[in-house]
Image (spheres, rainbow, N blue to C red):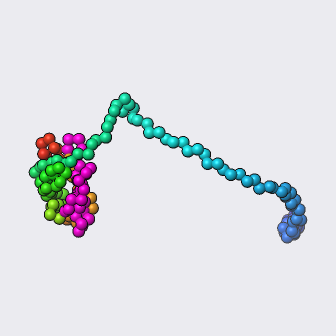
Amino acid sequence: MKLIHAAALLALLLGACTTPVPVPVPEPVSTPVEPVATVAKPEPVERIKSQPLKHLLGRSIKPIPDQALEVRTRCSFRDVAGGRGTMDLLVTNAEVKRFVAEVNIPKQGLCRFDMKTFKQTARLPNVVLTDAASGCVVRMWEQEKGVTVAFNACQSKCGGDAFSYLWPILVDTRNGRCS
């Protein structure tokens, strides 16, 4: 029995050592291909027309005219997060006569703005005050029944991380209150 196993093992080993006979691979038949010159014509661009919103159909809405900003306020405010602030603002015929604002943001710091350090650089459509030394820009514009006073790049006017939490100040032109 051992002899049969040995003979079978020997036959397997000899069979593994032989190399297979190479099978000829047929070469692909090449057919000459003529280059086709195609010039792709640009497809016509479809123009997209502006569609009015369904609730604006049939209405004749005109753009808001540019008007000179008029606002006068001496106000103080408190927000829901505990921040407090005051502002003294007088703008006549889009010319800033007086602007002093102070906003205290709890656990963050204090922001102070004073007209003395700013120069008015625009009147219409928005009033713009710019501090050339720090790059701080204060913009004011009228919107519905209020005036918005917004601050941009004014980190130098704030202590701590207060500027990261500074929101625009809104002035109600009907009663002079701000929030």
From the viewer's perspective, is residue 70 above or below residue 51? below
Q: Residue at the location (54% across, 42% down)? A: 46
- Asked if residue 173 shows in the view, the reply is yes
Is residue 129 magenta-colored? yes
Q: Is residue 2 visible?
A: no
| Residue 13: x %, y % from top left | 84, 69
Q: Residue at x 23, y 49 (%)?
A: 141
Residue placed most toward the observer, 97 or 33 = 97
Q: Quadrant of residue 103?
A: bottom left
Q: Is residue 58 left or right of residue 176?
A: right
Which one is in front, 142 or 164?
A: 142
Queried whether the magenta region covers residue 109, the answer comes back as no
Q: Considering depth in this image, is 69 or 81 the residue closer to the camera?
A: 69
**Furthest-left residue in view?**
74
- Judge by depth and name the residue closer to the eye, 76 or 146: 146
Q: Which residues are magenta?
A: 118-146
Q: Where does the image place residue 70, in percent across and percent down from the top left?
A: 16, 47
For the image, the number of numbered tags is: 0
Q: Is residue 63 above or below residue 80?
A: above
Q: Is residue 50 left or right of residue 157?
A: right
